[in-house]
Amino acid sequence: MTYGSVRGACLALMLASTVAAGAADPRADLVLTGGTVVTLDPARPRATALAVRGGRIVRVGDDADVRALAGPRTQTIDLAGRTVLPGLADAHVHTEGVGAALETLSLVGAASLDEAVERVRRAAAALPPGEWLLGRGWDQNDWPDKRFPTAAALDAVSAGHPVYLTRVDGHAGWANSKAMELAGITASTVDPTGGRILRGEGGAPSGVFVDRAQGLVTSKVPAAPREVRKRRLLRGLRAAAEAGLTSVHDAGVGLDTVALYKELLAEDALPVRVYVMIAMDEFLARGGGLRPEIGLGDGRLTVRAIKVVSDGALGSRGALLLAPYADEPGTRGLRTVDPARFREVLRVAVMRGFQVNTHAIGDGANRLVLDAYEQALAGAPGGGAQRRFRIEHAQVIAPEDVPRFKAIGVIPSVQPTHCTSDMYWATDRLGPERAKGAYLWRTFLRQGVVLAGGSDAPVESIAVLPGLYAAVTRQDAKGWPEGGWHPEERVSIEDAIRMFSAGAAWAAFEEKERGTIAPGMRADLTIVTRDVTAVPAADILKTEVALTIVGGRVVYDGSRRP
């Protein structure tokens, strides 16, 4: 499959209807001229200008050709040499989490346990007595001794507040003794299925809870009021627009969040398009009574996917591996989904027309998900490829399982900045041979597999340009390691852009609407200050988002940033 051919006859019909609708008034609503337009359309890969009418692109060409469509009411934007990309999308984000991270204690970048604890001390001093102190972002891999923290370190500075701090990956949490007391957690508390309580002497909980064990504490944290959650959701969406994103795929939300999205849609307050994955437990609780909702509000909101979590994360050693961890031979990680429930959600999804998107990081988890998908899709009408089931992350894959993605029709939804965050310690976790099967972007592309790009924000930054840089270089911002970590898996800048545009659109069944710049497509555009296809890779990180346009409407203007 090629991105340039998927539109086919349907695009021809769209073009015909666009021409007919505009026959009475051929003038454009919006014209952009004087720049570089990277289209990803094989029919015209490059241009200098484009015109928009009714939220869709009506012409792509040179300045003179496009200016001919301008009228007295046409909004004209002089690109002044800037570059237009197809609207970039984040195929895996936690939108409310992005907003919440802007309002709670951040431990991102804490270089030691002492620095993290000092941040907690300052935050605790500012809270009303007895209020829960919540935060996220710590990563023991960034600390000198690499050990998990303990409750005792928090007890000394938390001033009587219950404290719960989510690890950077969202798959572990760090609690103080007060929080564990309120949750009734003692040495006799058993590990839940799919979770692990880290323990000290005598089996006493140390204060760190991995994967499903987190619920033992988080179930006691007071829920944020509805108006707070709505505000955080909107803040996350605005952060996406500021990052140059025109669409986000929200990975694993409840029906209450879907209701908030619909409220924002009714208020015309969604700055970007949203593709929703409903959390598996919420989906099953409805007994299969849900139906996909596609293209609400002129394509602003779609609810047609289910999110399943099959294992944990590498950083907290919860990712399910086929063989033990190289740096902790006593564990292979955690399976976090019940097999019977997984089979049921797949059965109902196939019957009801839902896509299934399953978190799988370890090679063990990727295999069990591929096995389950293969079985569920074997008799699916139209074949498995049409269902476009996804594996979210697809980080570590056994060599014999790699060809199965193409054979079954599974889309790897990948986050390039996970690679560049994990590369410092991934070989220690996996061992050198198994690390060769990690973050296999170029391998997948060579096999004709569509990749969807994302960030997993707030685990990583929602900024999309660092994602492009990571995909192209497999290096950190300082250029380490020289040549890139496993450089054979680097991709071209064009393929990186495609992952975050056409690939993400394909993964949301929207390739006939978005992902390339061509007549008939929605006018979702990301305008940046450099032509990232023509500069040294390091300059991608120096590039800024100038404008974000969704449906022909400017939703972010970098020139107006305070």
Image: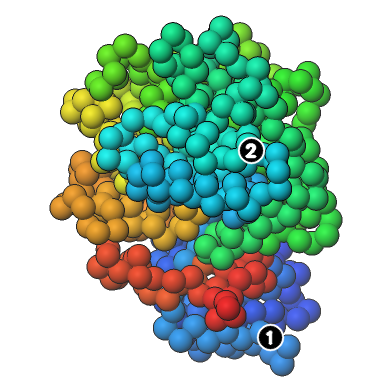
Depth check, front residue: 34 or 490: 490
Find residue 492 and report its image quarter.
Answer: bottom left
Q: Residue at x 64, y 87 (%)?
A: 70
Query: Where in the figure is residue 558, as x and y percent of width and height?
Result: 54, 76
Depth check, front residue: 455 or 510: 455
Q: Is residue 381 visible?
A: no
Which quadrant of the figure contains the N terminus?
top left
Query: Where in the figure is residue 42, as x and y percent of width and height?
Result: 41, 60
* Residue 74: assigned label: 1
Residue 173 against residue 264 in the figure, above or below: above
Q: In the rendered structure, which amino acid carries the disc numbered 1?
A: Thr
State which mark lies toward you, 2 or 1.
2
Residue 271 against residue 110 in the figure, above or below: below
Q: Residue at x 50, y 37 (%)?
A: 156
Residue 125 against residue 535 in the figure, above or below: above
* Residue 161: assigned label: 2
* Helix, strand or loop for disc 1: loop
Depth check, front residue: 174 or 543: 174
Q: In the rendered structure, which amino acid carries the disc numbered 2?
A: His
Q: Is residue 56 left or right of residue 81?
A: right
